[in-house]
């Protein structure tokens, strides 16, 4: 986490006062292990203040401002932050009530310009100031924070220690995630299998249904990266044990990148024949890095051949036509009657010359069949490639396999 300090006030630039707030904050930050990379002083000038804020917002995670929260026209920190985030400040009624109480308790008349200290913008949360009239602002955006504090050192110290440091310490901890990606398993089934893990608080285990399958995200929060990774590891091992072989990838993996890596690692060449998926499988495999070395070509069947059940024949034809070691055939058939809207997918993998072939059938919603069908095809190809390798040395290939 990178921090930056901006002190606002022309008196600092005129040499009228010594900037003790920066020294204080710098000491507190370094004690917390937060890196302070920049510290700026800027006068009471809106244009220059916004310029400083903008630069800080581009390069730092936490921007701490001091000063400029007074009630007068030259206190411009609220205006500057509002301009930066493009929001308009308005009087917050709860803060206005607090402010009036503050003045009443001291029997001082509150003037209208004081209401500026009850301003908020939608992105800002007020930070309690027990020592003065100006609450701070805590603005969070895209994981970055702008924290505005009043200039008087007593107020700033108090607000920092009571309200800001504890929360910052919380968010200063490292959050690390590991995502396991699954296919051909339902979200509800995953939920049942992972019941023992999903109720834990740290690491958390959560699942998300995505187009390429279910993602299971393990998230750990810890003081530093190694501790977070250490916390994730046993949970990942247990998650994998519970889920079995439906896990196809992790983190940034895509089905095409994982499948492509598997084909390449087997030293095989591949050709695709696809009917119902209209070339989607070829487009995915063809776009995977390094596929030029093994992807021999694809036939896309349309017209009267669009709906076919002969996945094995289509796979074999593609392999023959492109002289590839492996042929992948993807066919499909729209179901009728009560099952209308569902397509039956037929996928075949053949390994030329080895006698190895494997067919499987899946079902997919008709409107999603191009994408989902392509994912089923890649899933089946991966399963076949794993099997093909295991059975290679003993010539055990040729065993047909039917999955549903
Ligand atoms: P302001 O928030 O601009 O109203 O600040 C009010 C007063 O806080 C100033 O007049 C100074 O006395 C004090 N002050 C502001 N900035 C600093 C600073 N960086 N270091 C020490 N005192 C400050
Ligand atoms: Mg000032």
Image (cartoon, grey):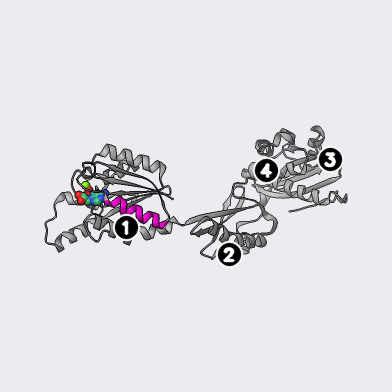
Task: Kindly indicate the quadrant of the structure image that contains residue 352.
Answer: top right
Q: CA distance from mark 2 to mark 4?
A: 31 Å
SS at mark 3?
loop
Question: Which residue corresponds to the image point at 84% horizontal and 51% vertical from the top-left?
Answer: 399
Give the residue pinned by disc 2: 197
47 displayed left or right of 188: left
Q: Nearer the viewer, mark 1 or mark 4?
A: 1
Residue 107 spot, x, y in % from top left:
11, 61
Residue 357 spot, x, y in % from top left:
82, 46
Part of the protein shown in magenta: 20-32
The answer to if 21 sits in the magenta stretch is yes
Give the residue pinned by disc 3: 352
Q: Nearer the viewer, mark 2 or mark 3?
A: 2
Give the residue pinned by disc 4: 374
SS at mark 1?
helix
Q: Earlier in the sequence, mark 2 or mark 3?
A: 2
Question: Which residue corresponds to the image point at 76% horizontal and 47% vertical from the top-left?
Answer: 385
SS at mark 4?
helix
SS at mark 2?
helix
Residue 148 spot, x, y in % from top left:
30, 50
Q: Residues within 10 Å of mark 4 (few under 14, many from 20)?
A: many
Q: Nearer the viewer, mark 2 or mark 4?
A: 2
Q: Earlier in the sequence, mark 2 or mark 4?
A: 2
């Amino acid at each position: 986490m990178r921090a930056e300090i901006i002190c606002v006030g022309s008196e600092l630039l005129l040499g009228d006062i010594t900037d003790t707030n920066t020294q204080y904050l710098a000491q507190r930050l370094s004690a917390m292990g937060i890196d302070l990379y920049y510290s700026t002083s800027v006068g009471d000038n809106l244009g220059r203040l916004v310029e400083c804020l903008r630069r800080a917002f581009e390069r730092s995670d936490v921007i701490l401002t001091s000063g400029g929260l007074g009630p007068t026209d030259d206190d411009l920190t609220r205006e500057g932050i509002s301009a930066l985030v493009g929001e308009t400040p308005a009087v917050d009624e709860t803060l206005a009530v607090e402010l009036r109480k503050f003045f009443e308790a001291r029997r001082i008349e509150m003037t209208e310009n004081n209401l500026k200290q009850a301003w908020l913008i939608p992105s800002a949360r007020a930070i309690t100031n027990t020592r003065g009239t100006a609450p701070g602002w805590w603005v969070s955006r895209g994981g970055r924070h702008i924290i505005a504090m009043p200039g008087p050192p007593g107020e700033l110290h108090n607000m920092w220690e009571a309200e800001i440091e504890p929360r910052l310490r919380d968010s200063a901890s490292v959050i690390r995630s590991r995502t396991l990606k699954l296919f051909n398993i339902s979200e509800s089934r995953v939920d049942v299998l992972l019941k023992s893990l999903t109720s834990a608080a740290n690491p958390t285990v959560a699942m998300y249904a995505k187009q390429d399958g279910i993602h299971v995200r393990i998230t750990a929060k810890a003081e530093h990266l190694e501790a977070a990774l250490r916390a994730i590891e046993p949970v990942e091992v247990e998650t994998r044990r519970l889920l079995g072989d439906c896990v196809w990838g992790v983190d940034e993996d895509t089905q095409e990148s994982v499948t492509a890596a598997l084909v390449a690692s087997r030293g095989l060449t591949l050709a695709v024949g696809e009917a119902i998926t209209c070339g989607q499988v070829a487009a995915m495999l063809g776009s995977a890095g390094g596929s030029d070395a093994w992807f021999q070509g694809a036939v896309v069947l349309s017209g009267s051949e669009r709906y076919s059940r002969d996945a094995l024949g289509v796979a074999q034809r593609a392999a023959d036509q492109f002289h590839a070691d492996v042929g992948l055939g993807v066919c499909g058939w729209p179901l009728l009657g009560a099952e209308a809207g569902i397509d039956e997918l037929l996928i075949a993998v053949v390994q030329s010359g080895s006698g190895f072939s494997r067919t499987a059938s899946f079902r997919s919603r008709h409107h999603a069949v191009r994408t989902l069908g392509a994912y089923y095809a890649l899933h089946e190809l991966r399963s076949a490639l794993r099997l093909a390798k295991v059975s290679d040395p003993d010539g055990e290939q040729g065993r047909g396999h039917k999955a549903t």
